[in-house]
Image (cartoon, grey):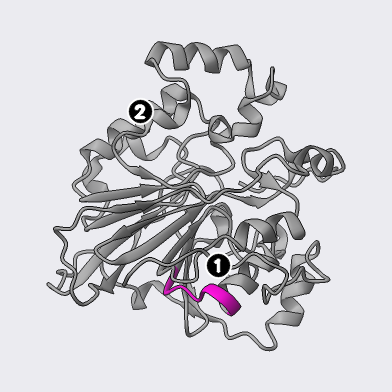
Amino acid sequence: MASKECADTDQDFPVTVDKYTKFPTKAWERLQVKRKYQYIPPQERLDPMTPVTPGSVRVVCISDTHSKVEIKDPDSIPPGDVLLHAGDFTMKGQPSSVSVFNQFLGQLSHKHKIVIAGNHEISFDDVIMSKKSLDPMFGSMQTYRDEMNKFGVKCTKELLTNCIYLEDSMVCLFGINIYGSPWQPVYSSGRWGFNICRGELLLEKWKSIPKNTDILITHGPPVGYGDVAKGGNHVGCVELLNVVQKVVKPKYHVFGHIHEGYGMSTDGDTVFINAATCTTQYRPTNPAIVFDIPLPDGHTKDEAPILHPKVSVDTASGRERDMSAVTSRLKLD
């Protein structure tokens, strides 16, 4: 399974902005007529204690742990070959919290741990950290800088030494291509990390997902799959779903962000996993979701990971202008 170039990003890209992109519930009402949706109940999911066959890779999925999982016994995370964390491992991305999370990762037995950031990891967002001050809800920028100086790092991402951190980038493990991206639709005036407006700006991020991705990790969900928030409204990204179903077609799509959307579903081609560990009350009670993926022919579990460069995306273009126009105060965790 040799690596290929990323998906084309020119004008011939087969996905355009949906006319209902800003109204995901309405968009899903129209899309679901032609899209298959099947919920996978807990009793039909793989039992984490089932032995792994020699020709399979055991993947363990968690997300939205919010500095809560570290207080539990590391053995509470099911064993496996690969651990995937789909973001929001802290509450506000404080370097001290990142360091504690990194230490917890170091206690886990999984051979490889793959992590992406979420909206709560504000210190991972280069645009936010390039500013002179933070939004008051996050405290003082100087506090973050003092903590980074204490740990001897220039950037909080450097504290993740016990995992492979993906940000619009890919890693190949045992011939299995895993791509990770932290972006999600903006809310709460764009105060949080990796928030970007629905429509063209988000679509540009999804255009960078390589077509040969086997496992896709995003922090936010696609519309229609694990994205129903309080009040019963769909809040996932319409363009993300269209790119996943029409272009990339990964075997698995792992995400979190919407705690109440925890669970598994499928469209017949891709298995969608909302792996949010914490409930809406921030209690880390949702079990990790596991699955086995066949080991590709000619590959072994002894292979070293192959990292592919971060995709070149302009993370600042249009964000200040578009976020300033957002007045929604939705609270999606």
247 falls in the magenta region: yes
Q: Which residue is mark 2?
A: 100
Q: Which of the two residues, 289 or 200, is positioned nearer the viewer here?
A: 200
Numbered circle sitting on residue 101: none
Mark 1 vs mark 2: which is more N-terminal? Answer: 1
Q: Is residue 73 magenta?
A: no
Q: Nearer the viewer, residue 298 or 252?
A: 298
* Residue 56 position within the rendered picture, expressed as x and y whole percent measured from the top left: 20, 72
Helix, strand or loop under label 2: helix
- Is 117 placed left or right of 21 in the picture? left
**In this image, 228 relative to 44: left or right?**
right
Establish if 10 lies above or below 82.
below
| Amino acid type shown at disc 2 | Val
Residue type at numbered disc 1:
Ala
Asked whether, in this view, residue 65 is left or right of residue 55, the answer is right
| Residue to which mark 1 is pinned | 7
Q: What residue sits 39% from the left and 60% below the top?
A: 178
Residue 79 at what x, y percent from top left? 21, 55
- The residue mark sitting in front, 1 or 2, is 1
Count of numbered badges drawn on the protein: 2
Compared with 235, 328 (above or below) is above
Q: Residue at x 75, y 47 (%)?
A: 330
- Taking the spot 56% from the left edge, 82% from the top edge, the residue there is 37
Q: The magenta stretch spans which residues?
A: 246-252
